[in-house]
Image (cartoon, rainbow, N blue to C red):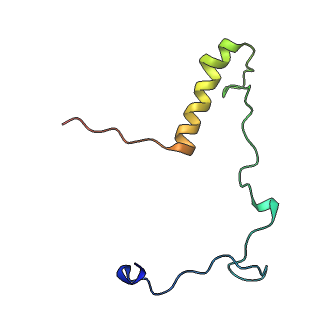
Amino acid sequence: MMQQLGITRLRPGPSGQPSATNSANYDPSKANPFPDLPELLTLKNGKKVTTAQMWWKERRPEIVEDFEREVIGRIPKMCPR
């Protein structure tokens, strides 16, 4: 299959040597580039969530919107013909 695809060699994986250019990352401080997660019970306008109804009607949709936009992604809408 590699010959059919024209692949002559594979890229090497991470090296066990810390000084190598392709060294594996074992530094926990580099593991999470976004350590500050948003507060779950605070609306985007800064108001605190105080009731279950407020959670379901206001805060949860904000979180779902952010998750769809930043993590999952969206399918582009089809243009009507």
Q: Which quarter of the image is occupied by the C terminus?
A: top left
Q: Residue furthest front?
A: 1
Q: Residue at x 40, y 42 (%)?
A: 75
Apparent side of residue 65 relative to residue 1 in the rendered image (left or right): right
Number of marks drawn: 0
User: With respect to residue 33, does 68 lie above or below?
Assistant: above
Q: Residue at x 53, y 43 (%)?
A: 72
Quadrant housing residue 38: top right
Q: Residue at x 35, y 81 (%)?
A: 4
Q: Residue at x 66, y 15 (%)?
A: 54
Q: Which quarter of the image is occupied by the N terminus?
A: bottom left
Q: Residue furthest right?
A: 28
Name the residue nearer the viewer: 81 or 24. Answer: 24
Quadrant housing residue 47: top right
Name the residue nearer the viewer: 42 or 14. Answer: 14
Instruction: Tell me where residue 40 appears, x and y as whole percent.
Output: 72, 30
Instruction: Tell me where residue 79 appears, x and y as whole percent.
Output: 26, 38
Quadrant housing residue 32: bottom right
Instruction: Tell me where residue 27 appears, x and y as whole percent.
Output: 81, 65
Q: Residue furthest bottom?
A: 8
